Amino acid sequence: MPVDQEKLAKLAASVRTGGKGSVRRKKKAVHKTATTDDKRLQNTLKRLGVNNIPGIEEVNLFRDNGTVVHFKNPKVQASIGANTYVISGLAENKKLQELLPGIINQLGPDNLDNLKKIAEQYSSGKAEGGAGAGDDDVPELVDDFEQASKQD
């Protein structure tokens, strides 16, 4: 049975992990990184003495560019001595305007600039809209509907 040397060399080159004299592996090992990383993280947090904090409904992380990382019903763990806080759950990137009415008490002095920009945009939009802005939503009546109902 003749063997194609080029094809054999190509196959051997794709699975060899070492140099010229190394043993050829039959198949590559696939590593499960997600579960091992999670286990390592849990072990590290356990060594730090992290405790669960129950009853937290939402967590907001404010960024410099005016966006907010918003966690709804997160799992919060903390180690006060190690100054370590772990927040896990579904995170959403939102603009500051989307969360504004209920989040004003969470804003600090570093977010005042973003709040001023939002207020300026709102006031300039209101000035451009002016008095007749609400009339555009409601169309004018074309026919007399009372006469049409009497005819039926």
Image: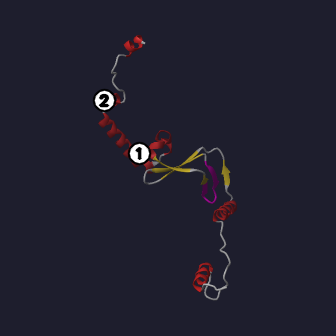
Q: Residues within 10 Å of mark 2 (few under 14, many from 20)?
A: few
Residue 8 at what x, y percent from top left?
A: 61, 83
Which image quarter holds the C terminus?
Answer: top left
Q: Secondary structure at mark 2?
A: helix
Residue 27 at what x, y percent from top left?
A: 67, 75
Q: What residue is disc 2 on?
A: 132
What type is the residue that disc 1 sits on? Leu
On residue 115, the disc is: 1
Which is nearer the eye, 81 or 97? 97
Which image quarter holds the N terminus?
Answer: bottom right
Gap between marks 1 and 2, in whole Å?
A: 27 Å
Q: Quadrant of residue 3?
A: bottom right
Colouring scheme applied when the structure was drawn: secondary structure
The extreme bottom residue here reads 21
Point out the tag, 1 or 2, that comes first from the N-terminus: 1
Residue 92 at what x, y percent from top left?
A: 53, 50
What type is the residue that disc 2 sits on? Gly
Q: Residues within 10 Å of mark 1 (few under 14, many from 20)?
A: some
Which is nearer the eye, 70 or 138? 138
Q: Quadrant of residue 40?
A: bottom right
Q: Is residue 136 magenta?
A: no
The extreme front residue here reads 1
- The relative height of residue 58 versus residue 11 in the rendered view (above or below) is above
Residue 9 at what x, y percent from top left?
A: 59, 84
Say which residue appears at 47% left-offset and 53% top-offset. 63
Q: Which residues, given as a range, are shown in magenta?
A: 74-86
Which is nearer the eye, 63 or 39? 39
